[in-house]
Amino acid sequence: MTVPFKVDLTNKVAVVTGGGGVLGSYFAKALAECGAKVAILDLNQEPADKIAAEINEAGGKAIGVAANVLDREALEKAREIVEKELGTCDILLNGAGGNNPRGTTDDEFYNAEEVKNNPDLKTFFDLDPKGVSFVFDLNFLGTLLPSQVFAKGMTEKEGCSIINVSSMNAYTPLTKIPAYSGAKSAISNFTQWLATYFAKAGIRVNAIAPGFLVTKQNEKLLFNDDGTPTARTGKILGSTPMDRFGEPEELVGGVLFLADQKAASFITGVVLPIDGGFSAYSGV
Ligand code: NAD
Protein backbone atom coordinates (compact mmCIF):
# COMPACT_ATOMS: atom_id res chain seq x y z
CA MET A 1 0.00 0.00 0.00
CA THR A 2 1.11 3.57 -0.51
CA VAL A 3 0.23 6.11 2.16
CA PRO A 4 -1.52 9.34 1.06
CA PHE A 5 1.27 11.40 2.68
CA LYS A 6 4.28 10.67 4.83
CA VAL A 7 4.78 11.60 8.45
CA ASP A 8 8.08 10.86 10.14
CA LEU A 9 7.61 8.00 12.59
CA THR A 10 11.25 6.89 12.51
CA ASN A 11 12.29 5.26 15.81
CA LYS A 12 8.67 5.17 17.00
CA VAL A 13 7.21 1.88 18.19
CA ALA A 14 3.56 1.29 17.33
CA VAL A 15 1.30 -1.43 18.73
CA VAL A 16 -1.78 -2.17 16.66
CA THR A 17 -4.36 -4.39 18.37
CA GLY A 18 -6.55 -6.30 15.93
CA GLY A 19 -3.67 -5.73 13.53
CA GLY A 20 -4.39 -8.99 11.74
CA GLY A 21 -7.88 -7.75 10.77
CA VAL A 22 -9.14 -5.88 7.73
CA LEU A 23 -8.70 -2.31 8.98
CA GLY A 24 -5.97 -2.99 11.54
CA SER A 25 -3.70 -4.37 8.83
CA TYR A 26 -4.08 -1.16 6.79
CA PHE A 27 -3.24 0.93 9.86
CA ALA A 28 -0.22 -1.24 10.70
CA LYS A 29 1.13 -1.06 7.14
CA ALA A 30 0.65 2.70 6.96
CA LEU A 31 2.47 3.27 10.26
CA ALA A 32 5.30 0.99 9.09
CA GLU A 33 5.52 2.81 5.76
CA CYS A 34 6.12 6.01 7.72
CA GLY A 35 9.04 4.42 9.56
CA ALA A 36 7.47 3.04 12.75
CA LYS A 37 8.45 -0.36 14.09
CA VAL A 38 5.13 -2.12 14.41
CA ALA A 39 3.84 -4.88 16.68
CA ILE A 40 0.79 -6.57 15.18
CA LEU A 41 -1.15 -7.78 18.19
CA ASP A 42 -4.02 -10.15 17.50
CA LEU A 43 -5.97 -12.92 19.19
CA ASN A 44 -4.30 -15.46 16.93
CA GLN A 45 -0.63 -15.67 16.03
CA GLU A 46 -1.20 -16.60 12.37
CA PRO A 47 -2.91 -13.43 11.04
CA ALA A 48 -0.53 -11.31 13.12
CA ASP A 49 2.51 -13.08 11.64
CA LYS A 50 1.08 -12.82 8.13
CA ILE A 51 0.73 -9.03 8.27
CA ALA A 52 4.11 -8.68 10.00
CA ALA A 53 5.73 -10.75 7.21
CA GLU A 54 4.10 -8.54 4.55
CA ILE A 55 5.48 -5.45 6.26
CA ASN A 56 8.96 -6.96 6.59
CA GLU A 57 8.94 -8.07 2.94
CA ALA A 58 8.10 -4.49 1.94
CA GLY A 59 11.19 -3.26 3.81
CA GLY A 60 9.56 -2.29 7.12
CA LYS A 61 10.04 -3.69 10.60
CA ALA A 62 7.22 -5.62 12.26
CA ILE A 63 6.54 -8.53 14.58
CA GLY A 64 3.39 -10.56 15.17
CA VAL A 65 2.31 -11.06 18.79
CA ALA A 66 -0.64 -13.18 19.93
CA ALA A 67 -2.63 -11.74 22.84
CA ASN A 68 -6.24 -11.42 23.89
CA VAL A 69 -7.07 -7.75 24.54
CA LEU A 70 -9.33 -8.91 27.37
CA ASP A 71 -6.56 -10.73 29.21
CA ARG A 72 -4.38 -8.39 31.24
CA GLU A 73 -1.74 -11.04 31.89
CA ALA A 74 -1.46 -11.90 28.19
CA LEU A 75 -1.15 -8.19 27.41
CA GLU A 76 1.66 -7.81 29.97
CA LYS A 77 3.49 -10.71 28.29
CA ALA A 78 2.91 -9.08 24.89
CA ARG A 79 4.35 -5.83 26.22
CA GLU A 80 7.49 -7.67 27.37
CA ILE A 81 7.92 -9.14 23.88
CA VAL A 82 7.35 -5.77 22.19
CA GLU A 83 9.82 -4.02 24.49
CA LYS A 84 12.47 -6.71 23.98
CA GLU A 85 12.09 -6.85 20.18
CA LEU A 86 11.19 -3.27 19.27
CA GLY A 87 11.36 -0.98 22.33
CA THR A 88 8.72 0.77 24.45
CA CYS A 89 5.45 1.73 22.80
CA ASP A 90 4.97 5.28 21.46
CA ILE A 91 1.74 4.78 19.52
CA LEU A 92 -1.06 2.46 20.57
CA LEU A 93 -3.80 1.89 18.02
CA ASN A 94 -6.72 0.06 19.62
CA GLY A 95 -8.13 -1.64 16.53
CA ALA A 96 -9.53 -4.88 18.02
CA GLY A 97 -13.31 -4.71 18.21
CA GLY A 98 -16.49 -5.57 16.43
CA ASN A 99 -20.06 -6.75 16.77
CA ASN A 100 -21.54 -10.18 17.48
CA PRO A 101 -24.88 -11.66 16.34
CA ARG A 102 -25.78 -12.40 19.99
CA GLY A 103 -26.06 -8.66 20.63
CA THR A 104 -28.15 -8.05 17.51
CA THR A 105 -31.93 -8.07 16.92
CA ASP A 106 -33.55 -9.38 13.74
CA ASP A 107 -36.08 -6.56 13.63
CA GLU A 108 -35.55 -2.84 13.13
CA PHE A 109 -38.83 -1.82 14.79
CA TYR A 110 -40.96 -3.76 17.24
CA ASN A 111 -44.15 -5.02 15.62
CA ALA A 112 -46.38 -7.27 17.76
CA GLU A 113 -48.15 -8.67 14.70
CA GLU A 114 -44.85 -9.66 13.07
CA VAL A 115 -43.74 -11.39 16.28
CA LYS A 116 -47.01 -13.34 16.46
CA ASN A 117 -46.51 -14.54 12.87
CA ASN A 118 -42.84 -15.36 13.36
CA PRO A 119 -42.10 -16.75 16.83
CA ASP A 120 -38.42 -17.32 15.89
CA LEU A 121 -37.82 -13.61 15.26
CA LYS A 122 -35.12 -12.33 17.67
CA THR A 123 -36.42 -9.09 19.15
CA PHE A 124 -35.07 -6.81 21.85
CA PHE A 125 -36.72 -9.12 24.44
CA ASP A 126 -34.62 -12.09 23.27
CA LEU A 127 -31.20 -10.43 23.43
CA ASP A 128 -28.74 -12.66 25.25
CA PRO A 129 -27.12 -10.73 28.14
CA LYS A 130 -23.93 -12.74 27.60
CA GLY A 131 -23.87 -11.65 23.96
CA VAL A 132 -24.36 -8.03 24.99
CA SER A 133 -21.53 -8.35 27.54
CA PHE A 134 -19.28 -9.95 24.94
CA VAL A 135 -19.66 -6.98 22.61
CA PHE A 136 -19.22 -4.43 25.40
CA ASP A 137 -16.15 -6.19 26.73
CA LEU A 138 -14.48 -6.65 23.36
CA ASN A 139 -14.87 -3.01 22.36
CA PHE A 140 -14.67 -1.17 25.68
CA LEU A 141 -12.50 -3.29 27.96
CA GLY A 142 -10.58 -4.37 24.86
CA THR A 143 -9.55 -0.72 24.49
CA LEU A 144 -9.14 0.10 28.18
CA LEU A 145 -6.88 -2.87 29.09
CA PRO A 146 -4.29 -2.39 26.29
CA SER A 147 -4.28 1.33 27.17
CA GLN A 148 -3.46 0.45 30.80
CA VAL A 149 -0.70 -1.91 29.78
CA PHE A 150 0.96 0.09 26.99
CA ALA A 151 0.43 3.64 28.25
CA LYS A 152 2.44 3.02 31.41
CA GLY A 153 5.72 3.27 29.49
CA MET A 154 4.39 6.26 27.55
CA THR A 155 4.22 8.37 30.71
CA GLU A 156 8.04 8.33 30.77
CA LYS A 157 8.44 9.37 27.11
CA GLU A 158 7.51 12.34 24.95
CA GLY A 159 5.27 12.54 21.92
CA CYS A 160 3.18 9.42 22.58
CA SER A 161 -0.39 8.89 21.53
CA ILE A 162 -3.30 6.48 21.63
CA ILE A 163 -5.77 6.14 18.78
CA ASN A 164 -9.08 4.34 19.35
CA VAL A 165 -11.62 3.16 16.81
CA SER A 166 -15.17 4.36 17.31
CA SER A 167 -17.95 4.18 14.72
CA MET A 168 -20.92 6.03 13.23
CA ASN A 169 -23.25 4.19 15.60
CA ALA A 170 -21.61 6.04 18.52
CA TYR A 171 -23.28 9.29 17.38
CA THR A 172 -26.74 7.86 16.70
CA PRO A 173 -27.39 4.14 17.24
CA LEU A 174 -28.02 2.00 14.19
CA THR A 175 -31.06 -0.29 14.17
CA LYS A 176 -30.55 -3.92 15.25
CA ILE A 177 -27.20 -3.41 17.02
CA PRO A 178 -27.83 -1.90 20.46
CA ALA A 179 -24.80 -3.56 22.08
CA TYR A 180 -22.31 -2.50 19.41
CA SER A 181 -23.77 1.02 19.26
CA GLY A 182 -23.58 1.41 23.05
CA ALA A 183 -20.06 -0.02 23.17
CA LYS A 184 -18.76 2.34 20.47
CA SER A 185 -20.46 5.26 22.20
CA ALA A 186 -18.49 4.22 25.29
CA ILE A 187 -15.30 4.28 23.19
CA SER A 188 -15.92 7.88 22.11
CA ASN A 189 -16.67 8.87 25.71
CA PHE A 190 -13.60 7.01 27.02
CA THR A 191 -11.43 8.70 24.39
CA GLN A 192 -12.38 12.07 25.87
CA TRP A 193 -11.94 10.78 29.43
CA LEU A 194 -8.49 9.34 28.79
CA ALA A 195 -7.41 12.40 26.79
CA THR A 196 -8.22 14.56 29.80
CA TYR A 197 -6.60 12.14 32.23
CA PHE A 198 -3.32 11.98 30.30
CA ALA A 199 -3.22 15.61 29.10
CA LYS A 200 -0.64 16.66 31.68
CA ALA A 201 1.33 13.44 31.17
CA GLY A 202 1.91 14.33 27.51
CA ILE A 203 -0.06 11.46 25.98
CA ARG A 204 -2.59 12.49 23.34
CA VAL A 205 -5.68 10.29 23.01
CA ASN A 206 -7.95 10.50 19.96
CA ALA A 207 -10.21 8.27 17.90
CA ILE A 208 -11.38 7.82 14.36
CA ALA A 209 -15.02 7.04 13.62
CA PRO A 210 -15.18 5.23 10.29
CA GLY A 211 -18.32 5.48 8.19
CA PHE A 212 -19.56 2.63 6.05
CA LEU A 213 -17.09 0.40 4.26
CA VAL A 214 -17.70 -2.88 2.49
CA THR A 215 -15.78 -5.61 4.29
CA LYS A 216 -16.03 -9.41 4.29
CA GLN A 217 -18.16 -9.36 7.45
CA ASN A 218 -20.87 -7.07 6.09
CA GLU A 219 -20.83 -7.64 2.33
CA LYS A 220 -23.68 -10.19 2.54
CA LEU A 221 -25.82 -7.56 4.30
CA LEU A 222 -24.98 -4.94 1.69
CA PHE A 223 -25.12 -6.85 -1.59
CA ASN A 224 -27.34 -9.65 -2.91
CA ASP A 225 -25.75 -12.74 -4.49
CA ASP A 226 -26.24 -11.21 -7.95
CA GLY A 227 -24.27 -8.09 -6.91
CA THR A 228 -27.25 -5.75 -6.69
CA PRO A 229 -27.41 -3.56 -3.57
CA THR A 230 -29.69 -4.59 -0.69
CA ALA A 231 -32.29 -2.27 0.87
CA ARG A 232 -29.81 -1.61 3.72
CA THR A 233 -27.25 -0.37 1.18
CA GLY A 234 -29.90 1.97 -0.22
CA LYS A 235 -30.49 3.40 3.25
CA ILE A 236 -26.77 3.79 3.99
CA LEU A 237 -25.97 5.50 0.71
CA GLY A 238 -29.10 7.65 1.03
CA SER A 239 -27.72 8.87 4.35
CA THR A 240 -24.17 9.41 3.06
CA PRO A 241 -23.98 12.75 1.23
CA MET A 242 -20.97 11.56 -0.79
CA ASP A 243 -23.21 8.76 -2.04
CA ARG A 244 -20.70 5.94 -1.80
CA PHE A 245 -19.00 3.54 0.59
CA GLY A 246 -15.56 4.39 1.94
CA GLU A 247 -12.41 2.39 1.27
CA PRO A 248 -10.09 1.21 4.08
CA GLU A 249 -7.28 3.29 2.50
CA GLU A 250 -9.37 6.40 3.17
CA LEU A 251 -9.02 5.90 6.95
CA VAL A 252 -5.24 5.95 6.78
CA GLY A 253 -4.78 9.72 6.37
CA GLY A 254 -6.74 10.38 9.58
CA VAL A 255 -4.71 7.82 11.52
CA LEU A 256 -1.37 9.22 10.34
CA PHE A 257 -2.47 12.78 11.05
CA LEU A 258 -3.53 11.91 14.62
CA ALA A 259 -0.38 9.84 15.17
CA ASP A 260 1.98 12.59 14.06
CA GLN A 261 3.23 14.61 17.00
CA LYS A 262 4.01 17.61 14.78
CA ALA A 263 0.75 17.78 12.85
CA ALA A 264 -1.55 17.00 15.80
CA SER A 265 0.50 18.32 18.73
CA PHE A 266 -2.45 20.25 20.23
CA ILE A 267 -5.14 17.74 19.32
CA THR A 268 -6.42 15.42 22.02
CA GLY A 269 -9.85 14.05 22.88
CA VAL A 270 -11.28 14.30 19.37
CA VAL A 271 -13.25 11.65 17.54
CA LEU A 272 -12.62 12.21 13.84
CA PRO A 273 -15.46 11.06 11.58
CA ILE A 274 -14.25 9.64 8.27
CA ASP A 275 -17.63 9.02 6.80
CA GLY A 276 -18.46 10.82 3.55
CA GLY A 277 -20.63 13.23 5.56
CA PHE A 278 -22.88 10.56 7.19
CA SER A 279 -22.63 12.06 10.70
CA ALA A 280 -23.24 15.59 9.41
CA TYR A 281 -26.42 14.82 7.50
CA SER A 282 -29.84 14.97 9.16
CA GLY A 283 -31.48 13.25 6.20
CA VAL A 284 -33.41 16.39 5.30
P1 NAD B 1 -11.85 -7.42 11.72
O1 NAD B 1 -12.78 -8.43 12.32
O2 NAD B 1 -11.38 -7.61 10.32
O3 NAD B 1 -10.57 -7.24 12.64
C1 NAD B 1 -10.62 -7.33 14.02
C2 NAD B 1 -9.36 -8.04 14.46
O4 NAD B 1 -9.38 -8.06 15.88
C3 NAD B 1 -9.28 -9.49 13.98
O5 NAD B 1 -8.03 -9.75 13.39
C4 NAD B 1 -9.49 -10.30 15.25
O6 NAD B 1 -8.76 -11.52 15.28
C5 NAD B 1 -8.98 -9.35 16.31
N1 NAD B 1 -9.57 -9.63 17.61
C6 NAD B 1 -10.86 -9.96 17.88
N2 NAD B 1 -11.02 -10.19 19.19
C7 NAD B 1 -9.80 -9.99 19.76
C8 NAD B 1 -9.32 -10.09 21.08
N3 NAD B 1 -10.13 -10.44 22.09
N4 NAD B 1 -8.02 -9.84 21.31
C9 NAD B 1 -7.18 -9.50 20.29
N5 NAD B 1 -7.58 -9.39 19.02
C10 NAD B 1 -8.88 -9.64 18.75
O7 NAD B 1 -12.61 -6.03 11.90
P2 NAD B 1 -12.37 -4.65 11.15
O8 NAD B 1 -13.49 -4.46 10.20
O9 NAD B 1 -10.98 -4.52 10.66
O10 NAD B 1 -12.61 -3.63 12.37
C11 NAD B 1 -11.54 -3.06 13.11
C12 NAD B 1 -12.13 -2.03 14.06
O11 NAD B 1 -12.83 -1.05 13.31
C13 NAD B 1 -13.14 -2.59 15.06
O12 NAD B 1 -13.03 -1.89 16.27
C14 NAD B 1 -14.46 -2.28 14.42
O13 NAD B 1 -15.48 -2.22 15.38
C15 NAD B 1 -14.15 -0.93 13.81
N6 NAD B 1 -15.01 -0.49 12.72
C16 NAD B 1 -15.12 -1.21 11.58
C17 NAD B 1 -15.90 -0.74 10.54
C18 NAD B 1 -16.03 -1.52 9.26
O14 NAD B 1 -16.84 -1.12 8.41
N7 NAD B 1 -15.29 -2.60 9.06
C19 NAD B 1 -16.60 0.46 10.69
C20 NAD B 1 -16.47 1.18 11.89
C21 NAD B 1 -15.66 0.71 12.89
Image (spheres, rainbow, N blue to C red):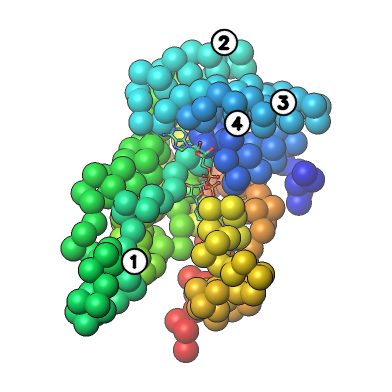
Residue at the disc numbered 2? 84
CA separation in Å, label 1 and label 4: 31 Å
Q: Is mark 4 within 8 Å of ligand 1?
A: yes
Residue at the disc numbered 3? 53
Asked if disc 3 and disc 2 are in contact, CB closer than 8 Å, the reply is no
CA separation in Å, label 2 and label 1: 47 Å
Coordinates of residue 180 in the picture (x, y in percent):
36, 55
Residue at horizontal 70 percent and vertical 33 percent from the top: 32
User: Mark 2 falls on what kind of element?
Assistant: helix
Tell me which corner region of the image, top left, top right, bottom left or bottom right, holds residue 175.
bottom left
User: Mark 1 falls on what kind of element?
Assistant: loop
Q: Nearer the viewer, mark 3 or mark 2?
A: 3
Q: Nearer the viewer, mark 3 or mark 4?
A: 4
Asked if disc 2 and disc 4 are in contact, CB closer than 8 Å, the reply is no
Crowd class of label 4 (few under 14; some 14 to 19; many from 20; radius 10 Å)? many
Tell me which corner region of the image, top left, top right, bottom left or bottom right, holds residue 68.
top left
CA separation in Å, label 3 and label 1: 40 Å
First along the sequence among labels 1 and 4: 4
